[in-house]
Amino acid sequence: MSATVQTTRDWLLTERPGSRLQARLGRAYNSWQRFSSNRLAVIGLGIILLLLFVAAFADALSPYSPVIGDLRGSRLMPANAEHWLGTDDQGRDILSRIIHGSRLTLYVVILVAIIAAPIGLLVGTVAGYAGGWTDAVLMRITDIFLAFPKLILALAFVAALGPGIENAVLAIAITSWPPYARIARAETMTVRNSDYIAAVRLMGASPMRIVLRHIMPLCISSLIVRVTLDMAGIILTAAGLGFLGLGAQPPLPEWGAMIASGRRFILDQWWVAAAPGAAILIVSLGFNLLGDGLRDALDPRGGDQ
């Protein structure tokens, strides 16, 4: 068994791969080695995997309904054997609401990443490769968005679109793409005059094909790292909108809205606001640790250290 593992490892780490697949698997194996050597990054990955598991099996894991409570007999109860994290002012089980709220958190961060990252990647690569007035116009638009604090700009968009989880996702996505455009532009400007791109250009490839097929893939690793690191900020922005009543609307178990409803009881029934706040803290920490680990693992200048 050990001989087979050693042979597979040698095949992955060979300096002369026999195919593109072998080369890609070798790079992935090197990246995983660098990532797994970072204990904090592995902890962050474990937190995110736990979040995915809880969200996927929320119906089976939650002991009570997240929206229906016992207002007469279970209002504002502290942690006990029946309600591990206590209940809120509507008699609803806080643990069940946090478990189901993980779905809303993933819904927000995934949709924002799907919307904002491609927009930033396209804007940045086009601006960096085209240069001239195209670069100037696209980057000035980017600067306008960067000039406003993200939460303030998101509040303005949500106020115009109306409260709701879908409008909150759209507002956060609109305010999240400019940093990705900056990163993609910087990466594009470092490779647009390289011999590799010049050879592709001499082969007759169009500018759009060069951008889509040859430059964008080179920017993916840096973009993945930045998106992962931004997940914590996205969660906090979504929670802030929910806290202000502009995100998910009651009775949805959104963590920011849960904190808002619990702030009235913060002195006596502190667990109502503390439990969702702790959930936001743990998940944000997990994304930050994961992002740091991915940055070290995917850094092309990191070598095999």
Image (cartoon, rainbow, N blue to C red):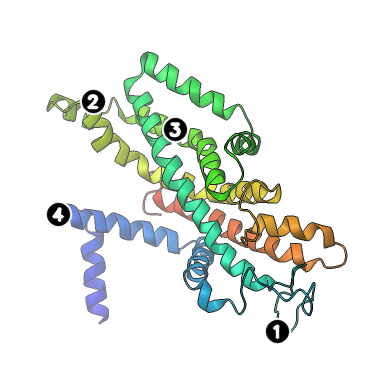
- For mark 1, give the secondary structure: loop
Which amino acid type corresponds to the residue marked 2 in the rendered image? Answer: Pro
Q: Which residue is labeled 2 in the image?
A: 207
How far apart are the two marked residues, 1 and 3, measured between alpha carbons?
Answer: 49 Å
Q: Residues within 10 Å of mark 3 (few under 14, many from 20)?
A: many
- Earlier residue among tags 2 and 1: 1
Q: How far from the left and from the top, in percent, is residue 9?
A: 26, 67
Q: Which residue: 65% across, 57% down?
A: 250
Q: Residues within 10 Å of mark 2 (few under 14, many from 20)?
A: some
Q: Image quarter for residue 128?
A: top left
Q: Which residue is labeled 1 in the image?
A: 82
- From the image, state whether disc 1 or disc 3 is nearer to you: 1
Does residue 267 appear to the left or right of 110 in the view shown?
Answer: right
Query: Is label 4 in contact with label 2 (beta carbons under 8 Å)?
Result: no
- Earlier residue among tags 2 and 3: 3
Which amino acid type corresponds to the residue marked 3 in the rendered image? Answer: Ala
Residue 181, disc: 3
State whether residue 17 is above or below residue 45. above
Which amino acid type corresponds to the residue marked 4 in the rendered image? Answer: Ser
Q: How far from the left and from the top, in percent, is residue 155?
A: 64, 38
Q: Nearer the viewer, residue 61 or 227?
A: 61
How far apart are the two marked residues, 4 and 2, measured between alpha carbons?
Answer: 28 Å
Q: Nearer the viewer, residue 234 or 174?
A: 174
